[in-house]
Amino acid sequence: MRPDGRRPDQLRDIEIVPDFLTHAEGSCMIKAGKTWVLCAASVEEKVPPFLEGKGKGWVTGEYGMLPRSTHTRSSRNTGGRGTEIQRLIGRALRAAIDTKALGPRQITIDCDVIQADGGTRTASITGGYVALALAVARLRARGLVSKEPMREPMAAISVGIVDGEARLDLPYEEDSAADCDMNVVMTESGKIIEVQGTAEGEPFERTLLDQLLDLAARGIRDLGTLQRAAIARGLEGRPK
Amino acid sequence: MRPDGRRPDQLRDIEIVPDFLTHAEGSCMIKAGKTWVLCAASVEEKVPPFLEGKGKGWVTGEYGMLPRSTHTRSSRNTGGRGTEIQRLIGRALRAAIDTKALGPRQITIDCDVIQADGGTRTASITGGYVALALAVARLRARGLVSKEPMREPMAAISVGIVDGEARLDLPYEEDSAADCDMNVVMTESGKIIEVQGTAEGEPFERTLLDQLLDLAARGIRDLGTLQRAAIARGLEGRPK
Amino acid sequence: MRPDGRRPDQLRDIEIVPDFLTHAEGSCMIKAGKTWVLCAASVEEKVPPFLEGKGKGWVTGEYGMLPRSTHTRSSRNTGGRGTEIQRLIGRALRAAIDTKALGPRQITIDCDVIQADGGTRTASITGGYVALALAVARLRARGLVSKEPMREPMAAISVGIVDGEARLDLPYEEDSAADCDMNVVMTESGKIIEVQGTAEGEPFERTLLDQLLDLAARGIRDLGTLQRAAIARGLEGRPK
Amino acid sequence: MRPDGRRPDQLRDIEIVPDFLTHAEGSCMIKAGKTWVLCAASVEEKVPPFLEGKGKGWVTGEYGMLPRSTHTRSSRNTGGRGTEIQRLIGRALRAAIDTKALGPRQITIDCDVIQADGGTRTASITGGYVALALAVARLRARGLVSKEPMREPMAAISVGIVDGEARLDLPYEEDSAADCDMNVVMTESGKIIEVQGTAEGEPFERTLLDQLLDLAARGIRDLGTLQRAAIARGLEGRPK
Amino acid sequence: MRPDGRRPDQLRDIEIVPDFLTHAEGSCMIKAGKTWVLCAASVEEKVPPFLEGKGKGWVTGEYGMLPRSTHTRSSRNTGGRGTEIQRLIGRALRAAIDTKALGPRQITIDCDVIQADGGTRTASITGGYVALALAVARLRARGLVSKEPMREPMAAISVGIVDGEARLDLPYEEDSAADCDMNVVMTESGKIIEVQGTAEGEPFERTLLDQLLDLAARGIRDLGTLQRAAIARGLEGRPK
Amino acid sequence: MRPDGRRPDQLRDIEIVPDFLTHAEGSCMIKAGKTWVLCAASVEEKVPPFLEGKGKGWVTGEYGMLPRSTHTRSSRNTGGRGTEIQRLIGRALRAAIDTKALGPRQITIDCDVIQADGGTRTASITGGYVALALAVARLRARGLVSKEPMREPMAAISVGIVDGEARLDLPYEEDSAADCDMNVVMTESGKIIEVQGTAEGEPFERTLLDQLLDLAARGIRDLGTLQRAAIARGLEGRPK
């Protein structure tokens, strides 16, 4: 039995509020239980230096945590962990988009953790996809982009082995007790974009890896349904 | 006629959601029109070095803006403006509390701007007071503090001269067109805690200063009623 | 009776040595009792990026303290307090000048505290005005600026309530004992450019604010006479 | 056919020179083709603050690249990429050691890239293991550690899909052309310590993941033989 | 003929005003022509970590330039040049003092360039010696130090080859045209504390080195007379 | 008798391996006993801003120490000492080259200390000269530079007084016991490029300075032979 009463293959309660912010071209607040991340897409009509003159666009991520998103207050400087996470977010979201079709513009996805209870990096990617899709849909609606840049929908989720059991979507309490912890970024149809698995205590067998990937694939499909609905609600509500 | 249809002496729609966050000892989300600030109070059982062994406590403020709180995205480094604002927040909130009665502990008030439309520093102080009062009430309820440390309720508001008219609670549009802009921190009964007034264009007459202070005093009284209600709702809802 | 024997409405002994430095386009050493600030105006024939192509100029301030300007040595990094003060200096001095008449050039006013005994930020503004006026007069003399950019003369002074008495131009000893402390930047005719008042202990009544502003206006007039004389001496002495 | 003529499942020429450095408690230069990393273990008889009084030790990694290790010179500040890699190195090497048996001391593994041609992070882990094992063996030989702290031998290797073929140990030329790139940290017996796989272009199928892990397991076994030999040579040569 | 009419072996007009500052334990303003450096000695009753418990004291230097000390304004961050100079100042002044006799206290000598016209580092050392000697004399007068810590008097001066002629005490104009430039720190009796010579253009012969050292020795003797007089005036004027 | 059995005027065993690195235009590993420095020359077809449009080139140096190059581990931030040394390296190597003949390109010489046992800055210059000469010879061979830019060969060495005896090429053990320590940069024919001498304890007589310079001149000549041989081997081995 999990601490919050969920089945091993069950996501936390997920809520995605599209267009949470007024100014951003696309945004959402994603809540996975007590983990809340505010994702905002900012479109700029310029590209980083290494892409100048290549006709392609760019998607990059930034990640931050509010000081009191955590159980005890942390300082504002997120240091190495934040850098690593924002590199992952950027890499993952670039797999969701055809940068040639996007054209010579940059979209920055800011993922700011309002409240943390495990799984902030995967919530950032899942919510970041919604913010990105909303921003891109508006570029298309305004005629700035002709060919659809969005590829197959994708999301991210954490899985792990806790008390000898493979479990989906770990909150902090389970995450800190897990023997093995994996973050999976996948397309809806189960193709892998990024997988990062770490043995927290003992090295683990490859059969476990397989179980965890099965579990992750299931969670990603469920997230896809929620993302799709949020994007639709956002596009109905506000033409921009 | 103001751009949003308000009377010159009318506040924007103010909403204060107490205990917005799970982990913080006290917190609130304050919304003044499209300006939203998340205020969180963190209590630590230690004091800064210069107060060690003096039996007194300390209240300090930190201020940040999410990158896409603004019309166009800003970088995460707030620089000099942020430093100046957080010094003001700390100074203002220390005037609201008897640090001897608080005892040897520090309360940090994090004010993070989720969305910005003018008046973020005054919303930070007004909301920061609510977060502080909630945290202190819980210290009292737990018997950690015996004498009431909170002094007379206080809040902060901006006032300015726009189109030759003294106006209360300026949004960004009015703020950037104001001839003179003042931030006032006051107690409910109208005593001054801090006043910062700046001529944006021409130096201004002292009679104008008086008009602006009258207007601010009125706004502060209205804010006091809302703060009081929010604190009461917070304390009913969650004993902590 | 004040510690140094002055009347409540009396300035400290003020000395302004114009053109203290050889290289600067305008400069002065201002001494207010034991507070000494070296102010230097540097003219550059370029403007900051946000003003490019607008035909207007810019005035900005920088503020520093020598490590042993203080009673005990401080480190060279002035941190937040310095940032806040230099923003104030820049804002105040920009009110003294018509940036259109100045034309597309930047004047940086460096205010470096040689010795500190209270009131360093107001001395910086008062002396900074002299350095700025000297530099601008030389631009005019060289025919680089045709319309007079200097507006009504201005200065800054501190006032405060010490032992229940409103006093002008507080040295460190009074400043640290004041119940309320205000820095006032005003034109010679008494118009307000910036006012920053802070209750150090108890919030204070608005009648006190009025008394303090009266006192400040008187000090500003006296400073104006001294500034005028220093500028005249500077311009006689050195054509540049 | 691979650019350097290797079979798909063949490592580059690997050379591990144990005790390359005089001062370090354990060290090696590891060369994998033209990728050369100098790994040095430094033992300190103290632990980081979060472990004080817990009787356990700590292993941490640092990673740097010499400016001209790369094709064109890079600046000395490695930024985010370096931070991410050194977090991986530390995590991986901690899985190779029983920190309780190590006792209250810290071992820092510095991995400095002398020359880079792909696979610097995996060479850092493989060589870092050798440096760590040498340093620990000397702690045991000096009687400072009684129970063996080293767990099952481990190493790291990169694998990827290039031209539709799964290949082991990618040099820069292949790495930059790979459709999918994975770094695998494994024990000699094939248990997973860390796996990080990224789709560079298209998301990839799970069957590919399996192929890549098989290939990695084979490379890790080969590396194990080389590591073992290098450690033995080091311990014969120098008692320390 | 030198640009300012001096003989090759003649110092610029030197003025040393002792106890220029009120708060510092010892200080002077040293003017060598248009080069002005403010030197302040700060005594602290503690030593740096590496000297704790050794019963010895420490002397360290810091060096800064005011932004408008130079012909055109420079930024406040002095970077590498400043670091190098302050290491030299500290090293040179430590040679002037017996740190055992000083006892377990640190004296920091701040050398801040008010106006620069060549030779700021040597003026810093020459003036720094005066500030240090004043501070030490007062420690002795207060009975805190029993054995005399000051060793043989010392000073520093620049010499160089300009237009084929060996010249003493180069101003900026000569310094920037010199073929070879040397800074010499010497005792009054001509013993070497530090010598730093650099060929600016062509490498130079050793006979030139000898000529320059002769010239420097002569300048150092003249500076010694001025330092001695300044210290005496300082000690007469103010017991402290 | 010296600790390592050398005569007072004898260099340590010196080994210079040319073209140690694959990617650099010129490089060498220089070993002077247990002091090992890796020197790499990087050619860029651009010049720093202050040389733009002047038709001249530039040579600059960077200096770093690997964390475990030293007896006990040091942090990666080399701070002031590193800055001072890299300024010296750049200045010294610029004296070895005619920057007009080099043409509008910059050569950066990275000197990274792999292992430290005294004399790292002089080994950096001696090895840096070899790396520079190799890179320049290849520019000439490729026809990019027509007139020979290399001037008279040069090198650097340390000398000092230990136990009352003038000694050449001090290892750490002697360096830390020296009464006087000097670094000399000279041409093969004995002309001075830079001399930096410091009295570590007592100020020293000028006759000692002469002895030390004689000793240095002798060492420089011996180094010249080794540098010449290394450059020849490098140019035979690899056309580039």
Image (tube, coloured by chain):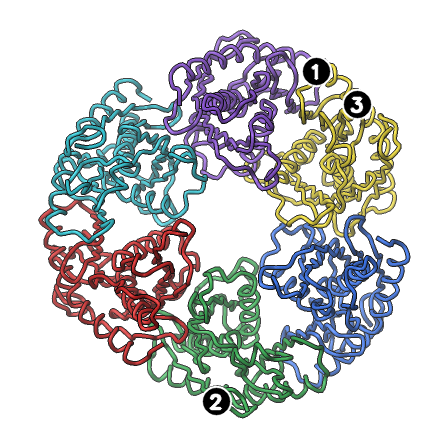
Chain colours: A blue, B yellow, C purple, D green, E cyan, F red
- Position of residue F36 relative to residue C123, above or below, is below
Label 1, residues with CA under 10 Å away: few <14, some 14-19, many ≥20: some
Q: Number of callouts in the render?
A: 3
Q: Earlier in the sequence, mark 3 or mark 1?
A: 3
Lateral position of residue B107 relative to residue B212, left or right = left
Report the chain holding disc 3: B
Mark 2 vs mark 1, foreground winner is: 1
Local SS, label 3: strand
Instruction: Tell me the quadrant of the picture where the C terminus of chain F can be found.
Output: bottom left
The answer to whether residue B193 is visible is yes
Instruction: Please give the residue where the numbered disc 2 appears in the rendered image.
Output: D225
State if disc 1 and disc 3 touch (CB < 8 Å).
no
Report the chain holding disc 1: B
Which quadrant of the view contains residue D166?
Answer: bottom right
Lateral position of residue F22 relative to residue A232, left or right = left
Marks 2 and 1, how far apart at CA: 86 Å
Lateral position of residue B25 relative to residue E16, left or right = right
Mark 2 vs mark 3, foreground winner is: 3
Instruction: Please give the residue where the numbered disc 1 appears in the rendered image.
Output: B205
Local SS, label 2: helix
User: For the point 75% across and 52% down, which residue is it?
Assistant: B23
